Amino acid sequence: MHNAGIAALGLNWRYLAFDVPPDHLRAAIEGARTLKFIGLNLTVPHKLLALEMMDELDASAQRWGAVNTIRFEARDAQGQWRPLGRFAGKVPDTVRAKGFNTDADALSQALREDIDWQLLPGTGVLLLGAGGAGRVAALKLASEGAGILFLVNRTIAKAEAMAAEIRKRFPQQQVTVGYPKNKVDMVINATSLGLQPEDDLPFDPKQFSLQQTRCVYDLIYRPAETALLKAARAAGCRAANGLGMLLHQGAKALEIWSDKPAPLGVLRRALEKEVYGK
Ligand code: ATR
């Protein structure tokens, strides 16, 4: 996706994947800074660890408490910090790392585009999962005022901790740990259940039915249709997988590095080809 986008923007960059164990994360970031990389993306389990390794945090990283995008910056002739990608000539040797988070905004954009989800006062959302992705989803929904939030997680203590964080940061948000008794507007799956073909549904069918929701969004994008999405479509729900969120978090990172609008069509086509081979 990124290499197609980089080519479409006419940039002489390359996007590469590196497998870095958590206890080498600091050294990897230092290495990339020294080598004057344009930036980095981070994924599980680095997003929280990187927070305290940044020289500067964008408001997005501060707000969501996780870093998925790093931009390396240096001072220009006027003394202003500028992305390394904007330097035409020699890049100064003093480089800082600035951390951003593009996941939260990508989720709300994907929800609007892919399931036409709009925030309606009084609507409820059932969020399944309280790991890294679930936490960002919960905080983002709470920041937008998502009616009542119902949090369900295999490890209840993690859902309770998340509920406590939401109550503290967004006191106007109603939040409950457990399944809704009545209808909700949307179910979001932020658990890893569905990644494997033999996985069960990510909720307990004795406690919740898909007849209780209008929309279902599964953060999983491979397989393209999890058992949850299949059941959701059969129940007549509006349903989408997580490819849109993946697309938008990447597009926003490319914009952060390049200061140019991301070529969304190019990114989407490249992503679909890579993920689904079509
Ligand atoms: P991510 O960053 O993708 O959110 P994570 O932080 O490891 O990854 O979170 C995985 C989520 O899937 C958690 O909510 C986890 O539940 P626990 O908090 O109880 O571990 C959930 N999950 C993983 N395997 C599961 C399973 N077999 N049944 C139910 N939930 C599961």
Image (spheres, rainbow, N blue to C red):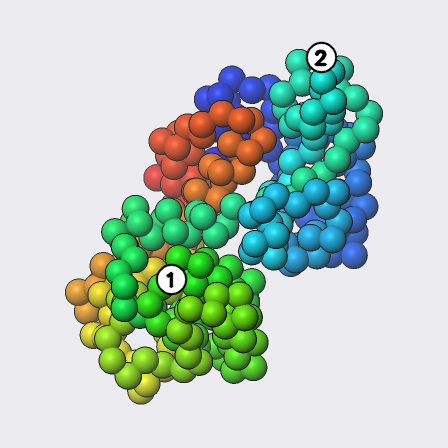
Mark number, residue 89: 2
Looking at the rendered structure, the kind of residue marked 1 is: Gly
On the rendered structure, is 169 left or right of 208?
right
Q: Residue at x 49, y 25 (%)?
A: 260
Q: Residue at x 48, y 44 (%)?
A: 249
Q: Residue furthest bottom?
A: 206
Q: Earlier in the sequence, mark 2 or mark 1?
A: 2
Q: Residue at x 66, y 45 (%)?
A: 57
Disc 2: CA contacts within 10 A as few (<14), some (14-19) or many (>=20): few
On the rendered structure, is 221 left or right of 134?
left
On the rendered structure, is 44 left or right of 114?
right
- Report the front residue among 122 and 128: 122
> Is residue 231 among the parts visible in the rendering?
no
The residue singled out by tag 1 in the image is 145
Q: Which mark is nearer the camera, 2 or 1? A: 1
Looking at the rendered structure, the kind of residue marked 2 is: Gly
In percent of width and height, residue 231 lies at 26, 69
In percent of width and height, residue 4 lies at 48, 28
Secondary structure beneath label 1: loop
